[in-house]
Amino acid sequence: MHPKSPFPAGYIESKASEIQTLEWLISYYEGRTASTPKKLLESYITMTGYYTNNPSLESMKETLKSIAMLYDWVYNNRITGF
């Protein structure tokens, strides 16, 4: 969130969905969420079905990034995407 060395221009913005997912995971492990990572993953996957009826390419791309990151966490116990 507050790096000591600057990232290249646009890097933080390009990783917004991964950062948001990581913040959610931190909140989960601190007991501040009402769901689990697996349930969030399932809801994101379900949500992609709604996007296919009314596609928004940018929102679909961000959701897919979150799905990939959560999948790796839930099933492989690792963080990827950075």
Image: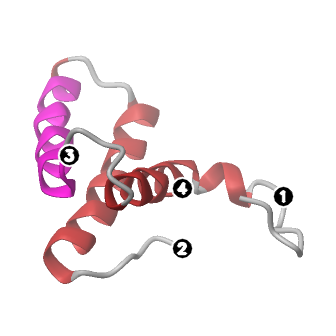
- What segment is highlighted magenta in the picture? 36-52
Question: Gap in Å between the C-alphas at discs 2 and 3?
Answer: 20 Å
Front disc: 2 or 3: 3
Total numbered labels: 4
Kindly identify the residue that appears in the image at 34 percent across and 61 percent down.
Answer: 29
- Pick the residue in front: 71 or 58: 71
Q: Which amino acid type corresponds to the residue marked 4 in the rendered image?
A: Ile
Disc 3 or 4, which lies upstream in sequence? Answer: 4
Please state which amino acid type lies under the numbered disc 3: Leu
Residue drawn at (41%, 33%) of the image: 59
Crowding at label 1, few (<14), some or many (≥20) Cα neighbours within 10 Å?
few
Label 1 near label 4: C-beta < 8 Å? no
Q: CA distance from mark 1 to mark 2?
A: 15 Å
In the displayed orientation, state which residue is furthest to the right: 5
| Residue 3: percent from left, percent from top | 81, 68
Q: Who's the residue at 18% across and 51% down the image?
A: 36
The residue where tag 4 is placed is 19
Instruction: Give the mark, 4 or 1, whose residue is nearer the N terminus.
Output: 1
- If you read the primary sequence from the N terminus, does the residue marked by circle 2 or circle 4 appear first? 4
Residue at which label 1 appears: 9
Q: Depth-wise, is mark 4 or mark 1 nearer the camera?
A: 4
Element class at badge 4: helix
